[in-house]
Image: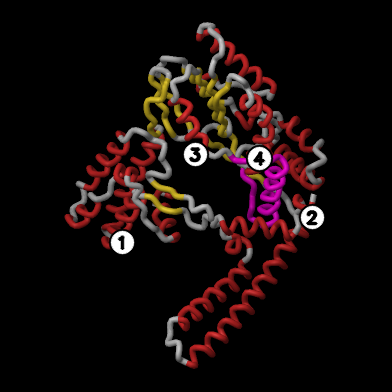
Amino acid sequence: MIKQSFSEKNIRKIYDLENRKGNNLEKIYFPDVVILTEKISYIKKKIKNYLRMDKHDFGRLIALKYYRKIKKEFEKEKEELLIKRLEYISLNILSNNYEVSLSHNKLKGKDIYTANTDTPEIFFLLKQLQFNLKNLYVIKQANRNFLLSQLKIILSNGFPKMTFKIDISSFYESIPRVDVIQTIQDDPKLSLQTRKTICYIFECLEKKYSNKIGIPRGIGLSAYLAEHYMKSFDDFFKTHPECSYYSRYVDDIIIVFNPSSDFSEEIIEKKYLKIINDQLRKKQLKLNNNKKVVIKNNENKTFDYLGYTFHIKSGSLEKINLTQKRYDNYIKKIELCFKSYFRQFIKCPNKANVMLKSRLRYLTSNTRLVHNKKNVMTGIYFSNKFITDYSQLEGLDNYLKNKVDLITDPSLQTQLRTFSFKKGFKEKIYVNFPKKFIKEIQQLWKYNV
């Protein structure tokens, strides 16, 4: 139970983890700690400058000793202040001195709920709840790259198979809340406060929005509850003797069966659909028949999965493209780059040139995500590595070329014509972008400014 507690020690672990992810909690919740961080940063710059000076300068050694001493004092003061703030947060959570506030919006016809994390108590409370569920029930977020690489191999082999691409209808809204709450309440392995707090969040939802069905879409906690609820469903297909591949990403599911009988494909399809529907019924869920795709041997079909379109020819994988939505998103980003350029050029032509080149270089190359210990790469190749057909990349290059032709500056035109989506993908071209610059580049696509 110690690992599940809302202690200062556990809150500190969350704090350090979030900071490593690039989520600056100091700036959000602890302005007095930020002041000390800025002082330490200033002292570090002083030390760095003195280290560059002549080693034989006696005054340099005295200054270095002084600033190193001041740095340690500020670091100690910062650590003590941070511990004090985290202890206060822990005390408030343990004494129930907080209130969970939920806001509601609609997105694509679905109800989306967001927890108000203006106060650090709510932020750390929800994070600790997620941590407790994740570790107790060994919940792991499905790895998209692993799922896609395995699916690619399975669909490429020549063995007889029947593939089902299915979607669960109104997934979060259909999960029976009563069952979820009862499971949480009855589990002695969960700490009492964890159980009480999860139930309290559902009570807040019912009280404010009269919502008594499903689990709230949009709250991070719901994803963990849903994964735990679906575990028996996942285990059934992963251990089914005729199932050679199973993957589920939230409510998006791929199941590949290798039939062991000589019955007709129509009979086999009905058999497997019955198995799928029976298992969904046990979880009180339903199949979305409008999004169902069944691929039999020797059939030509396409289906979308995790951002890619899989083209099946004669029952086997022919090629993989980006989904039309993902392709159109690249077109939109190129369009916004040039709209911003022409708008900005009137007032500040030099800045406009720099930003257009930077944005197009970012779109057509690859870079490393900042503040990521796993050195995760992103970009035209690393975000789309499973495509096997270059026609869409060539289409993006042609669209970009037509846009570049509108530029009147010959020098800028020459530089922009070196950018290529296809080349950036095939050659895995890497460009190092500073963190602040990436934010400025992405701001255009995020806020259309």
Q: Residue at x 60, y 83 (%)?
A: 69
Q: Residue at x 62, y 77 (%)?
A: 74
Callout 1: SS: helix
Indicate the amino acid at tag 2: Leu
Q: Residues within 10 Å of mark 2 (few under 14, many from 20)?
A: some
Q: Which residue is mark 2?
A: 94
- Foreground mark, 4 or 2, reads 4
Residue 89: x and y in percent read 73, 60
Using the numbered discs, state the Cα–Cα distance from disc 3 to disc 1 in whole angstroms: 37 Å
Check whether the beta carbons of the residues at disc 2 and disc 3 lie within 8 A of each other.
no
Check whether the beta carbons of the residues at disc 4 and disc 1 lie within 8 A of each other.
no
User: What secondary structure characterizes most of the magenta part?
Assistant: helix
Is residue 353 placed above or below 402 in the rendered structure?
A: below
Callout 3: SS: helix
Using the numbered discs, state the Cα–Cα distance from disc 4 to disc 3 in whole angstroms: 18 Å
Indicate the amino acid at tag 4: Ile
Q: How many numbered callouts?
A: 4
- Which numbered dot is residue 145? 3
For residue 174, say whether it is visible.
no
Tell me which label, 4 or 3, sits earlier in the chain: 4
Q: Which residue is mark 4?
A: 139
Q: Which residue is mark 1?
A: 351
Q: Residues within 10 Å of mark 4 (few under 14, many from 20)?
A: some
Using the numbered discs, state the Cα–Cα distance from disc 1 to disc 2 in whole angstroms: 52 Å
Q: Residue at x 53, y 55 (%)?
A: 373
| Quarter occupied by residue 307 | top left
Residue 269: x and y in percent read 54, 12
Q: Can residue 131 be found in the magenta stretch?
A: yes
| Quarter occupied by residue 381 | top left
- Find the magenta span and give its range: 114-141
